[in-house]
Amino acid sequence: MDTKYIFVTGGVVSSLGKGIIAASIGKLLQARGYKVTIQKFDPYINIDPGTLNPYEHGECYVTEDGFETDLDLGHYERFTGIHTTRNNSITTGRIYKTVIDRERRGDYLGKTIQVVPHITDEIKRRMLREGSSFDFVITEVGGTIGDIESAPFMEAIRQLRWQLGRNAVCVHLTYVPYLKAADELKTKPTQHSVKELQSMGIQPDILVLRTERHLDDHLRMKVASFCNVDLECVVQSEDMPSIYEVPVSMQQQGLDAAILRKVKASPSPSKGGGVKIPNSAAIPIATSNQTSPLSEGLGEAWTAWLSFLDKQRKATREVHVALVGKYDLQDAYKSIRESLNLAGIYNDVKTKIHFINSEEVTGDNVADKLGDMAGILICPGFGQRGIEGKIIAAQYGRTHDVPTFGICLGMQMMVIEFARNVLGYKDANSAEMRPTPKQTLQQQTLPQPLPVMEGSSHQEPVNVIDLMEEQKSITEMGGTMRLGAYDCKVLKGSKSFDAYSQSELSTPLHNREGLGEGLLEGLLISERHRHRYEFNNAYKEEYEKNGMRCVGINPAANLVEIVEIPENRWYIGTQFHPEYSSTVLHPHPLFLSFIKACIKNK
C-alpha cells in the first residue's frame, strides 16, 4: 500500500492537546494493525529544545539515539510504544541550518536561496522521508494557525496535499469556548481558524473541537456547514478524567474510521500487507452517540488498553509521593509524573503527587514537608539552584527509611548527602556546583580529586560527582553531555535486579563457565541518559564499604549507573532517566517497584 500521511494542525489558541490527538490517532491505527510513526515539527528557531528553560517549553524528552526533543514525543511513545529518533523531531532551526550549510558548500550552484522553494522543499523532504518504512506517518505541526513562524510549514503541507492526493489527510484541532454570561458555546473562533487555514490553500478534512462542555449534533452541523467538512468528520474532544481515555473517545466518535475512509483504506491491513479497498462508495462512520462500526478491526493491543483504563477507574486507594524539584510547572517533569501515575495504576492505587519546591526545603521544615509522604522522588535538573533542599530531602529519606528514588541529578544529590553525613566529607559536592576562578563558559579545569585517608586533613575540594577526564577539554555547549541509551549491568542480589528481572527491558547475563541458572550474575539493560557529570570512581570503594552499593555499572566505561542502600526498604538512585522508557502498556519496573514500596510504607 502507498504510505498515508496525516497532518495535525491547531488553531485559535495553543495548548489544546495536538500531541494527545496525534498520539491517539497513532494508537487507534496501530491497534488496527497498521505500522505507524509520529513526528513533530516545531516552528521555533532553536536547533532542539535541549537548551530551553523548562518554564519555556516543559520537559526535554530524550530519544534512544540521544536527541533532545519536545515533550510531545513522550506522549507518542507512551501511547504507542514506538521508539522515536532524531528524525521524529524537527525545528525551524534544523531546517534553516541544513539549507544554509548546503548553500555554504555550494550545493545550490549559486542560486538565490528562498523560503519557497528551498526551505519548503527541505520541510517536505523531512515530512516524507519516513514514509518507506510505515503505513501511516502522522505529522504534528506546533504552534497555532496564523503564526508567522509556521507559514513555511503550512505552505509545505499545502503542496504535499496536492502531490499526495488521497494519500494525505489534514486534521485541524480548534477550540470552542463557553461564555458563562451568555450560557453559550461559540463556534466563531473555529470558523475563523478554518478560514485562516483555507486562506493558505489548505482545506481541513477532519475537525477536532476542543471543548469543556458537550457539543450537540446541531452545533456540530453548524461547524460542518460553515467549514465545508462532513458532519461525521466533526469530532469533539471534551475534557476527560485522564488523557488515556482520549483514544477511546475518538474511536467511539469514529475518528479513526473517518481517516480510513478519507484515504480509502480498509479497517485493517490484509495478511499480505496491503489494504483492502472497499467497493462501496464510503465506509460508514459512527456519530457521537454510537460505537464505530469499524471497531471489529481493533486487535489485542486495544483490549489491553481498555483493561488498563478499567484498572485506572478502579484504583481509588491513594498513595502520596513527594516530587522534590525546582521547577514548579507540571510539564517540567511530565514523563516522571506520568510514570508515577502509570505505576500506581498497575499497583491498584492512585498516585497523588505533591510538588515540593527544593529551594524551600530546610533542615527545620523538612519533616513538615515530607513527614506525611509515603515516598520521595528527587528530580533531575541542572545547576546549583535548589540542590541543598534536594540533599536535605535525600538525608530525610535515608535516615527515616522512607522509599526514596533519585533520578539523574537526584541520584547525585543522594551520593553527595551520603558523602557528607556518612563518609564524613562535610564539603563534598559536585564539580558542577563548585566553580573555580579558572572556570569559564569555554573551559572546565577542575582537578580530579583523590580519596582522602581516614583521619587525614584535606585541602582540595571533594568532588564525589565530577567530569570524566576526556570531557574537560570539550567547549561546545552540549558537547560534554552523555545523551541517549547506554548499556548497564545490574548486579544480582540488588533491589534493582529484582525489579528488572520482572521486565522485558532486561537480558540475563551469565558468567563464562556456562549458562546454568546458578551462574546468572546479572542483567543487561539499556536506559537513556541526559547529564554531564558522573559518579567519581575514586570514592567507589569507600561508598561500598560504608553501605551504599554501586549495583549498576556501564560495562564499556565502568561508570556507575545505579546506587542503592540495601539496609533501607527502598533507597535507589539512577544516573539515567527511567521515565523515558515507561509506557501505558509497559510501565517501567523501577517505578512499579518504587510505588509498591510506597504502598507498604503507607
Image (cartoon, rainbow, N blue to C red):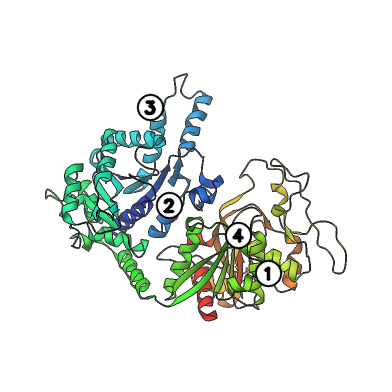
Q: CA distance from mark 3 to mark 1?
A: 60 Å
* Res 456 label: none
* Res 72 label: 2
Q: CA distance from mark 1 to mark 4?
A: 23 Å
Local secondary structure at mark 3? helix
Q: Residues within 10 Å of mark 1 (few under 14, many from 20)?
A: few
Q: CA distance from mark 2 to mark 3?
A: 28 Å
Q: Is residue 215 left or right of residue 279?
A: right
Contact (Cβ within 8 Å) of mark 1 with mark 4:
no
For the residue marked with disc 2, what is the amino acid?
Asp
With respect to residue 98, does 25 lie above or below?
below
Tag in front: 2 or 1: 1
* Res 116 label: 3
For the residue pair 210 and 494, the one nearer the viewer reads as 210
For the residue marked with disc 3, what is the amino acid?
Val
Q: Earlier in the sequence, mark 1 or mark 4?
A: 1
Q: Is residue 554 visible?
A: yes
Residue at the extreme right? 456
Q: Which residue is mark 4?
A: 408
Q: CA distance from mark 4 to mark 3?
A: 44 Å
Q: Earlier in the sequence, mark 3 or mark 1?
A: 3
